[in-house]
Amino acid sequence: LTIGVMMVTITLAPVYLDPLFNDYTPLPDGPVKTEVLKLARANGVPADNVYLVDASRQSDRISANVKGLFGTTRIALNDNLMKQDIHEVRSVMAHEMGHYLLNHMWKLIITVALLIAVSLALVAVLALIAGVQLFCFGLLAELQMRTYHESQGRPIYRVRETLRGGLAAAR
């Protein structure tokens, strides 16, 4: 379920979720857009537009990203990056496209799936061990109670009836 939610979120984020938090506008035609799209085409990044994000209202860091899965892939540059020269933009975009091309998103999804599976298996094993220990402690307590009461000359079924009667009376 978690993996499914992650995949849906990653697929929908560039188109529906990210625009809820920032304004995304198509980058005007010019040398930066041309250079970024040329870099994308040369490396097989399936994007036909570049978007500008108004990130300067939140931070002064420079950033860009390539987001999305299954046809929702988008390239976005933040407006702080646009204050840099074309070589800086190209370097940042090459780095971000590298994440996309090296399948880091899929590796993240697989890693999270494995962590969840290992965590659930560990919890199951610990619960099994704890359950076996509790069961063993129950048997041990039963054996001690039986041994003690039988050594006192009282049959164990009489002790149980007395206990049940005491519990019923206490209610």
Image (tube, rainbow, N blue to C red):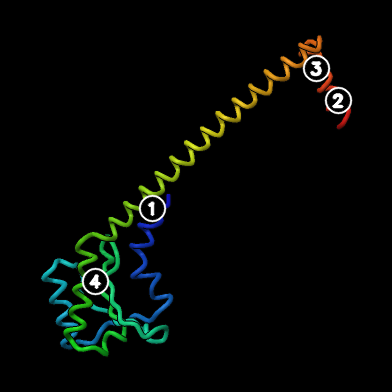
Q: CA distance from mark 3 to mark 1?
A: 55 Å
Q: Quadrant of the C terminus?
A: top right
What residue do we see at 65% from left, 25% from top? 138
**Looking at the rendered structure, which numbered label has been put on residue 36?**
none
Residue at the image point whose x is 13% and y is 68% from the top: 43
Tell me the tag on residue 4: 1
Q: Nearest the camera: 113 or 49?
A: 113
- When the figure is inspected, residue 128 is found, relative to residue 23, above or below; the finding is above
Q: Can you say whether 10 is above or below 168 in the image?
A: below
* Amino acid carrying mark 4 in the image: Glu
The amino acid pointed to by label 1 is Gly
Q: Which residue is mark 3?
A: 159
63 left or right of 144 in image: left
| Residue sitting farthest toward the right | 169
Q: Which mark is residue 96?
A: 4
Q: Secondary structure at mark 2?
A: helix
Give how far across and how far down residue 146 sits, in percent.
72, 15
**Near-viewer residue (28 or 76):** 76
Circle 2 residues within 10 Å: few <14, some 14–19, many ≥20:
few
Residue 29: where, in percent of width, then height? 19, 87
Question: What is the CA distance from the residue labelled 2 to the residue labelled 3?
Answer: 10 Å
Identity, as a three-letter code, of the amino acid under mark 2:
Gly
> Residue 143: x percent and y percent?
67, 18
Discs 1/4, front: 4
Q: Which amino acid type is shown beneath numbered disc 3?
A: Val
Q: Secondary structure at mark 1?
A: helix
